[in-house]
Image (cartoon, rainbow, N blue to C red):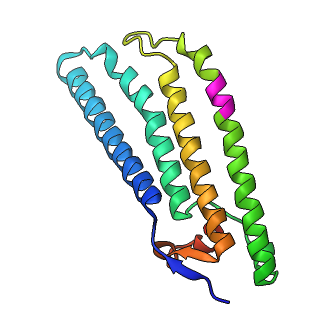
Amino acid sequence: MEPVVVERNALERAIVFICSVVLWVTTGVIFVILTANTALRYLSGSSLQWANEVPELLFPWLVMAGVVLAAEKGAHIATVFLVDSVGARARRIIAIVAWISVAVLYAVLVRATWGMLEIVHDERSPILQVPGSVTYGCVLVGMVLLALLALLAAWRAWRRKRVEHDLGEPGAQAAQG
């Protein structure tokens, strides 16, 4: 039985939109700050003290947004030769178990990160005094989004459905169960 093809649901569209905005904004801001600071350093021999700190704070958000987008598109590395060697029913069961396991592991990381937020909140960046919890917050948000995507993939594997936009992309078979 061939899987039924579906489009992204509202949650996936929202995740893609939010992560895309975060990716573009952080990349743009980091680029502008580093370019301006480099030009200032070249032209006047001085630099903005905070210009090194802001990219350090934004870079983890850029990375997590990219990780979530890659997961949503099924673009992460997967080894599927063993799974491909079994029948469709076994592949479906493996996909369901694997995606639920992935979601549970992300939930464990969410819980661990949540516990660390209070500890790192007292750490401050040297110049802007931004709490360390801002950086850990991006990890927390990213792990929540990854867990949601894994649960959606498990649900689709259960219902024998695939996301339409992924069918032509490399790695889609592994990512969508």
**In screen coordinates, is 76 left or right of 101?**
left
Q: Quadrant of the N terminus?
A: bottom right
Question: Residue 39 in the image: x percent, y percent?
Answer: 21, 28
- Residue 121 higher or lower than 60, as above or below: above
Can residue 81 be seen in the rendering of this structure? no
The image quadrant that residue 56 belongs to is top left
Residue at x 75%, y 60% (from the top left corner) = 98
The one nearer the camera, 61 or 155, is: 155
Q: Main secondary structure of the magenta part?
A: helix
Q: Which residues are magenta?
A: 111-115
Question: Residue 158 in the image: x percent, y percent?
Answer: 69, 71
Question: Residue 64 in the image: x percent, y percent?
Answer: 50, 42
Question: Residue 81 in the image: x percent, y percent?
Answer: 76, 75
Q: Is residue 32 magenta?
A: no
The one nearer the camera, 151 or 43, is: 151
Q: Residue furthest left?
A: 43
The image quadrant that residue 140 belongs to is top right
- Residue 2 higher or lower than 147, as above or below: below
- Residue 22 higher or lower than 126, as above or below: below
Q: Quadrant of the C terminus?
A: bottom right
Residue at x 46%, y 58% (from the top left corner) = 12
The image quadrant that residue 40 belongs to is top left
